[in-house]
Amino acid sequence: MDYTTIKIETSIQDSCITEEFLYLAGISGWLEEEKDDKKIITIYLPQDESGESKLKLISEGLKNIDSKTNKTILKAEDWENDWKKNFKAIKIGKIIITPPWETPKAENSEKIITIEPGMAFGTGDHATTSACIELIQKYLKKDMSMIDLGTGSAILSMVGALIGGKQITGIDNDPIATTEAKRNLERMNLSKEIEIITGDAMTDVHGQYDLAVANLFLHQVKDIIKSNLPYLKKDGFFIGSGITIDQEEEAKKAVAESENFEMLEVLEKGLWIAFVAKKIK
């Protein structure tokens, strides 16, 4: 299948709005590069009905953003080479995330996660994902349990399992996402260590967990806090991300207004933040 390649050039500040809109349009992967005070976001859309529908949504959304857009056609045989040129192995703490065509060496207690091309959001390259990976390594201790809300590619679930977590569950309401998540677990031989559920994070989570992570949107993170996370143990940790830096105060307010949580830490990554709150009741 051939692809439509779309390069969106916008300001660093407006790139947050652009990326949030891409999430809402159902775009699951893109590449990013910064050039001077600009950010260039590259997305690939299949030339089928689904791709055409997303292309129309993107065109409408970009009308309200100061940006330049360049559209080209990429032949199927060139698509993987394009990814190979841009998708490189990255290291986040003790976790190395790599595409299958690179062979990084793990040193000491480092762990390697291999992600197939096409899953750019969820490779750890995006600030919200890398922030969650950092915080999981800090707060999830050996044999602690974890629930990954909106698991996507299951990369955060895999991080939890590889650093010694037990009873790791990933849940997503998108069956396409959970199907891909299960494929990723099979490639990593982690299917027995991690359970993947297709369902609603508000109603379909059972059991009790030591840590919950949600790399979603601010309104979803706020809803999760309001629910008081009945499946999170007392003294457990909640990591919330997918929040722009200008939404930081709103996120802090949501935690402060809850009687069940106290804020422990806010981690800034460029124009994005992630936070950790402790369940106190």
Image (cartoon, rainbow, N blue to C red):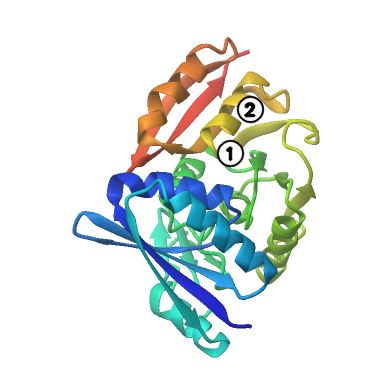
- Label 1: few (<14), some (14–19) or many (≥20) C-alpha neighbours in 10 Å: many
Q: Residue at x 56, y 30 (%)?
A: 219
Query: Viewer-proximal residue, 117 or 260?
Result: 117
Q: In the rendered image, which quarter contains the C terminus?
A: top right
Tag on residue 122?
A: none
User: Residue 222: x, y in percent?
Assistant: 57, 25
For residue 216, above or below residue 185: above
Q: Residue at x 69, y 60 (%)?
A: 181
Left or right of 3: which side holds 231?
A: right
Tag on residue 224?
A: 2
Residue at far bottom of view: 77
Corner quadrant of residue 252? top left
Question: Is residue 63 visible to the viewer in this orientation of the structure?
Answer: yes
Which residue type does callout 2 highlight? Ile
Left or right of 132: which side holds 273?
A: left
Question: Is residue 103 visible to the viewer in this orientation of the structure?
Answer: no
Mark before the other along the chain sequence, 2 or 1: 1
Query: Viewer-proximal residue, 117 or 231?
Result: 117
For disc 1, the marked residue is 214
Corner quadrant of residue 162? bottom right
Q: Residue at x 63, y 51 (%)?
A: 157
Corner quadrant of residue 259? top right
Q: Are marks 2 and 1 in contact (CB under 8 Å)?
A: yes
User: Residue 161: x, y in percent?
Assistant: 63, 52
Secondary structure under tag 2 reads helix
